[in-house]
């Protein structure tokens, strides 16, 4: 069974099997597809990219729900807490969904942007932008 709602008692994981203070572990195969400091597929990849170089515990991953949960889950727990940097933030959604109202992750739809015929997530996945505007409108916000 996969939890459809957030876990009770500050637990993490698809089946609420992890403690909130679970430390990161070597990334599974899908984790290596993520850039350090990003989320996707239910994972957050520790570390960051600075001047085109990976830094920190970039070979480690934690459950995406560990991002900004108030616990330093990346590394040994004493590191700079990459999973807690830049908090609070809008919870990351798995691409192509973006954060919507009420904290829900939703896919972009043309009706989200006035005068838009085709919408897609921005590169950072934080919002939707228009890819094709109705005539005579132009630009990512039409």
Image (tube, helix red, strand yellow):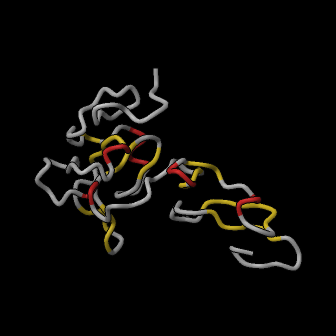
Residue at 51% x, 47% y is: 94
The quadrant where residue 42 appears: top left
Is 123 situated left or right of 109 in this image? left
Residue positioned most to the right? 135
Task: Using the image as rendered, state which of residue 74 and residue 136 is in the foreground.
Answer: 136
- Quadrant including the C terminus: bottom right
As drawn, 113 above or below 1? below
Residue at (20%, 41%) from the top-left corner?
23
In the rendered image, the residue lying farthest to the left is: 78
Q: Residue at x 32, y 61 (%)?
A: 87
User: Quick check: 78 left or right of 137?
Assistant: left
Q: Residue at point 41% right, 30% down?
A: 14
Q: Horizontally, is 102 left or right of 74 in the view?
A: right
Residue 107 x, y percent position in the rendering: 64, 50
Q: Say left or right for 128 vs 82.
A: right
Residue 1 position in % (x across, y down): 46, 20
Looking at the rendered structure, the number of numbered marks drawn on it comes to 0
């Amino acid at each position: 069974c996969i939890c459809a709602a957030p876990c009770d008692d500050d637990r993490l994981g698809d089946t609420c099997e992890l403690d909130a203070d679970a430390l990161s572990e070597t990334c599974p195969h899908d984790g290596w597809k993520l850039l350090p400091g990003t989320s996707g597929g239910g994972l957050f990849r520790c570390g960051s990219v600075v001047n085109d170089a990976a830094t920190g515990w970039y070979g480690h991953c934690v459950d995406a729900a560990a991002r900004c949960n108030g616990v330093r889950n990346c590394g040994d727990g004493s590191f700079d807490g990459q999973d807690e940097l830049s908090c609070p933030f809008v919870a990351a959604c798995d691409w192509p969904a973006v954060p919507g109202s009420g904290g829900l992750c939703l896919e972009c739809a043309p009706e989200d942007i006035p005068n838009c015929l085709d919408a897609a997530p921005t590169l950072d996945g934080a919002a939707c932008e228009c890819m094709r505007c109705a005539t005579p409108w132009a630009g990512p916000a039409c």
